[in-house]
């Protein structure tokens, strides 16, 4: 790992999560291949709630072979010690996990550290912490975060403008509401169940990428993509 985290995140637009609430362990590697194929996600996270650290590590090792070949960073949810042990690209932690300063000391400067935030106040608090990005949400109701009230779209632009690092909007975001989220000011999004449950994953990813490209055009700028797309014209 030679690139600093910001170099790997600045052009990332689409963040996927291999969530074992939706995917069987036996399907993880194949799903990782499909998600990180050309035109796929720019960042991938392994989220295995309810599994031991040893189990998470065993899931991560073969997935890393896939993500490294694709050039896509793999982050481990909740387990910084696993991220270090398997040499993953980073970790994502929640509000109630280990203090960010301790996580950063463990991972060092070259691994990615992300943090969940669930309000404007939490996002602003994270701006002063040694993180590389934040997740901001849930934007909409989602079964993966039933304990959190949806925060809606009204503060997306504020967080996006104030943040010193990338902001990934998360929570109930799917193809059918993606344009609205992008129109509210989001530049980066996390999609979970929409991707994992898609009947035609390749087609779903193409439509997501088209929405991202359309948003770039409407905002008057072109953003580079980590994952190449088939030529669409314009950005």
Image (cartoon, rainbow, N blue to C red):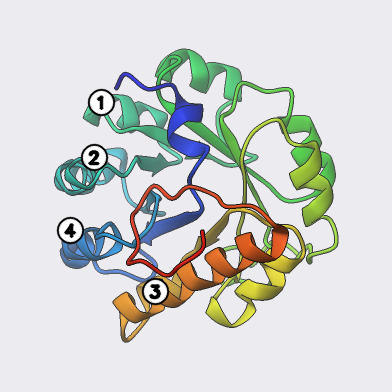
- Whichever of labels 1 and 2 marks the residue nearer the N terminus, that label is 2
Give percent across and percent down for residue 220. Answer: 69, 57
Would you say the residues marked 4 and 2 are in contact, meaning their CB atoms lie under 8 Å apart? no
The number of discs equals 4
Residue drawn at 45 percent across, 77 percent down: 207
Contact, CB < 8 Å: mark 4 with mark 1? no
* Disc 4: which residue: 29
Viewer-nearest of labels 1 and 3? 3
Quadrant of residue 161 in the image? top right
Determine whether the residue tagged by mark 3 lies in a helix, strand or loop.
Answer: helix
Alpha carbons under labels 4 and 2: distance apart: 13 Å
The residue that disc 3 covers is 206
Q: Which mark is residue 57?
A: 2
- Contact? badges 1 and 2 (CB < 8 Å): yes
C-alpha gap between disc 3 and disc 4: 21 Å
Going from N to C along the chain, the mark reached first, 2 or 3, is 2
Residue 140's tag is none
């Amino acid at each position: 790992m030679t690139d600093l985290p910001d170099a790997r995140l600045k052009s990332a637009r689409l963040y996927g999560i291999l969530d074992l609430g939706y995917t069987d362990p036996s399907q993880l590697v194949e799903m990782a291949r499909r998600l990180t194929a050309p035109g796929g996600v720019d960042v991938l996270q392994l989220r295995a709630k309810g599994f031991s650290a040893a189990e998470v590590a065993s899931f991560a090792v073969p997935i890393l072979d896939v993500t490294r070949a694709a050039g896509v960073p793999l982050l481990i949810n909740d387990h910084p010690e696993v991220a270090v042990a398997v040499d993953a690209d980073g970790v994502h932690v929640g509000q109630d996990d280990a203090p960010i300063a301790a996580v950063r000391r463990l991972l060092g400067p070259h691994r990615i550290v992300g943090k969940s935030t669930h309000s404007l106040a939490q996002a602003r608090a994270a701006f002063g912490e040694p993180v590389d990005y934040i997740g901001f949400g849930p934007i909409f109701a989602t079964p993966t975060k039933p304990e959190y009230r949806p925060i809606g779209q009204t503060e997306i632009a504020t967080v996006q403008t104030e943040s010193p690092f990338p902001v990934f909007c998360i929570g109930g975001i799917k193809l059918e509401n993606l344009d609205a989220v992008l129109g509210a000011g989001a530049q980066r999004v996390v999609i979970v169940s929409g991707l994992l449950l898609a009947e035609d994953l390749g087609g779903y990813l193409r439509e997501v990428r088209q929405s991202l490209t359309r948003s770039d055009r409407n905002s008057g700028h072109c953003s580079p993509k980590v994952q190449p797309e088939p030529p669409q014209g314009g950005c």
